[in-house]
Image (tube, rainbow, N blue to C red):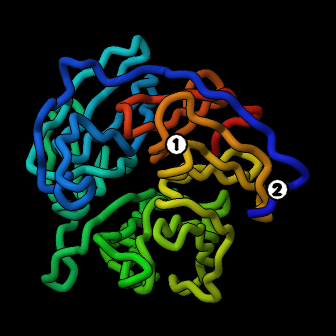
Amino acid sequence: MSWYPAPRLVETSIHTAMPDALRKHGVVTEWSRANKGGAAIDCFIEGPCFDSRGNLYVVDIPHGRILRISPDLEWRVIADYDGEPNGLAWHPEHRLIIADYKNGVMKLDPERGDVQPLLTRRNSERFKGVNDLIVARNGDIYFTDQGQTGLHDPTGRVFRLTASGRLDCLIDNGPSPNGLVLDANEKVLFVAMTRDNAIWRLPLLGDGTTSKVGRFAQFYGISGPDGLTLDAQGNLFVAHASLGAVFVLNPHGEGIAKIESCAGRTITNVAFGGPGGQTLFITDSSSGSVLRADWSERGA
């Protein structure tokens, strides 16, 4: 990754951490057996998402929980179910929708805590393992189907579920598709390909397909890029799951800033919030913490 002209270093602070009373100490789950070598993981938070009242929602993947953090930093479990929730997004029709690694795409009424299926299969087949999602202005849902894919098995997929109910497969050769975000005009979809250690750029054509997909940026390390977001100037924020930082790329793919974690190295996702929408909130899954950093622009 090239730096232009030189990286701006941005510090973080701990916004809040999951209270000890909510952590699942000593519990080994199927998710931790597959993804963490069978270690007992007390929590693994991901998928930060704000509502209009300033509440921050996060998921706890291995323990099937959705949690709400109030502006006063009070944590509350609002859903506890048989799933592995990974990503969250607001949808005008379905309220909160969940990228669930175990079940597919789910929907949640945050007041009732009721989790229901939205899309669990394609042509009667289960997904590999849905990872993250984003909602377009017209209600289309873009989501990644990662599973255990990687360079050894580049069969991860990127789907679009249209508002009319049609399911399109945009990519079926992805080595671990993960976080994703649309540009301001919703003409380009950026996808983090974790095991390729890269960001792919998918032009979205008028007929609903994609063409001339390319690498927008390349990284390094033992894991790779995870969650993505954009600011109002079109700068791309890339949470890297092993380098302990969020990397900021300008619209040309050049690195302009590095936001360094003050906690652990497993930086998994990012979302803008706070007054004026100029605070970046970052999930550090290794410590169960939400970090924060001030930024010069508001989130897109």
- Give the left or right position of residue 194, taking residue 124 as reference: right
Nearest to the observer: residue 45 or residue 244? 244
At horizontal 16% and vertical 62% (from top left) the residue drawn is: 103
The quadrant of the rendering that contains the C terminus is: top right
Specify the amino acid type for callout 1: Val
What kind of residue is marked 2?
Answer: Trp
At 20% across and 61% down in the image, what residue appears? 34
Question: Would you place residue 174 above or below residue 268 in this image?
Answer: below
Q: Position of residue 152 (x, y in %)?
A: 38, 83
Q: Residue at x 61, y 21 (%)?
A: 275
Image quadrant in which you'd find residue 27: top left
Q: Which mark is residue 270?
A: 1
Mark 1 packing: few (<14 Cα in 10 Å), some, or many (20+)?
many
294 w.r.t. 118: above or below:
above
Residue at image coords 68%, 45%: 231
Mark 2 closeness class: few <14, some 14–19, many ≥20 residues within 10 Å = some
Q: Nearer the viewer, residue 192 or 53?
A: 192
Q: Earlier in the sequence, mark 1 or mark 2?
A: 2
Q: Residue 202: which quarter of the image?
A: bottom right
| Left or right placement of residue 24 versus residue 260 in this view | left
**Residue 88 appears at what percent x and percent y?**
36, 47
Q: What x and y, as percent, mark residue 277?
A: 62, 31
Q: Is mark 1 on a helix, strand or loop?
A: strand
Q: Which residue matches tag 2?
A: 3
Observer-nearest of 133 and 92: 133
Q: Residue 209 in the image: x percent, y percent?
A: 52, 85
- For discs 1 and 2, the disc positioned in front in the rendered view: 2
C-alpha span from label 1 to label 2:
21 Å
Question: Residue 9 appears in which quarter of the rendering?
Answer: top right
